Amino acid sequence: MSTTATDDLLDRVVQILDDGAIALLAGVGHETGLLDTLGVLPPSTSAQVADAAGLDERYVREWLGGMVTAGLVAYDPGPATYVLREAAAPYLTGSGVDNLARTMAQLTLLATAAPKVAECFRRGGGTTYADYPGFHAAQAAESAAVNDVALIDTVVPLTGLVERLEDGLDVADVGCGQGHAINLMARRFPASRFTGYDFSPEAIEAARAEAAAWGLTNARFAVHDVAEPLPEEYDLVTAFDTIHDQAHPARVLAGVHAALRPGGTFLMVDIKASSRLEQNVDLPWASFLYTVSTLHCMAVSLGQGGEGLGTVWGVERATRMVREAGFVAVEPKELAEDPFNVYVVARA
């Protein structure tokens, strides 16, 4: 390897080190509200920022140093004031889909499980969902950012069932988590009946609480392992970013097919990537996907004695597995509003 190539590689490794550190700081900034606070403040001292955020000034000042050297916050040494750069604000603040600081906060949560995953490298096996305190709430917030913007007006129409939902259909969501997607659909289509299934009692409790707060009478939730047969028949079944996490995804897909009435529809939302590594090299967030898979999605599947499908199972394998479950007219669709996911629509 030439000296130039070695130097370039060293520069790349140092950049990875620096960027990884800033991702952790940005995650802390999201969790503590520092980034949202900065987003509404004029140029301010560290004491003023800390006071506005209700945080300790010394920690805030050190955090600001990292954000300044990362180029995300501007610093005026005369009055010693800081201000979030205007161009960075859309990607670091707010509850919308563009806030990548919310995504970076997931890395801080995943890091807590890294030692346990490292041990799995040595002995095999995997982790449990209990090894990731707070991670599922973070994922729910991530999903909600997309669903609040696009679920009703953009995603549901992909099924071609809007008019029938207006009249009344039976709908289930497998791996519903905290149930926000079900509740959004139930609120929009009051004549239809919605059921969310998840094996986490805590998630189901949160789903029921939201449904109650919204006064929904057509949404219900049940603690149920979706690898087991669903107890009822449905016209539409959805799965939002959950199939790749399953211990036995093929069994889940077969169960979904069995639970659908003849001609019923399955909408599966999952990660948009290729099943072939070489096709992911130029995907800008591919390294993030493989990291999440290694530290969480694959690990929790293996921890349940599962297949360890992984986050990056890919569109090719996803559509093949849906067909193998018995579905026909399997069609992957893409949305400009959501570059991270593929939307697979299939018929029973």
Image (cartoon, grey):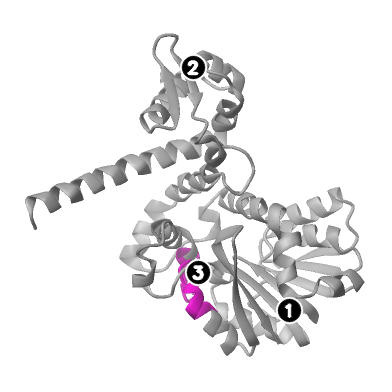
Q: Earlier in the sequence, mark 3 or mark 2?
A: 2
User: As drawn, is 2 to the left or to the right of 152?
Assistant: left
Up the image or down, 9 lies above or below 230; here it is above
Inspect the magenta stretch and tell me whether residue 314 lies in it.
yes
State how far apart marks 1 and 3 are (Cα).
Answer: 20 Å
| Residue drawn at point x = 35 percent, y = 42 percent | 19
| 10 Å crowding of disc 3: few (<14), some (14-19), many (20+) | many
Q: Residues within 10 Å of mark 1 (few under 14, many from 20)?
A: many
Q: Which corner quadrant holds the N terminus?
A: bottom left
Residue annotated with mark 2 = 46
Residue type (three-letter) at the residue carrying disc 2? Ser
| Residue that mark 3 sits on | 301
The first of marks 2 and 1 along the sequence is: 2
Instruction: Classify mark 2: helix, strand or loop.
Output: helix
Range shown magenta: 298-318
Instruction: Report x, y in % for residue 182.
Output: 76, 62
**Quarter of the figure with residue 321:** bottom right
- Residue extending furthest toward the top: 79
Q: Is residue 42 visible?
A: yes
From the image, state whether disc 3 or disc 2 is nearer to you: 2
Left or right position of 190 against 125: right
Tell me residue 22's x, y (percent): 40, 38
Residue 179 in sight here: no
| Residue plotted at (91% across, 73% down) | 167
Question: Which residue type does callout 1 highlight?
Answer: Leu
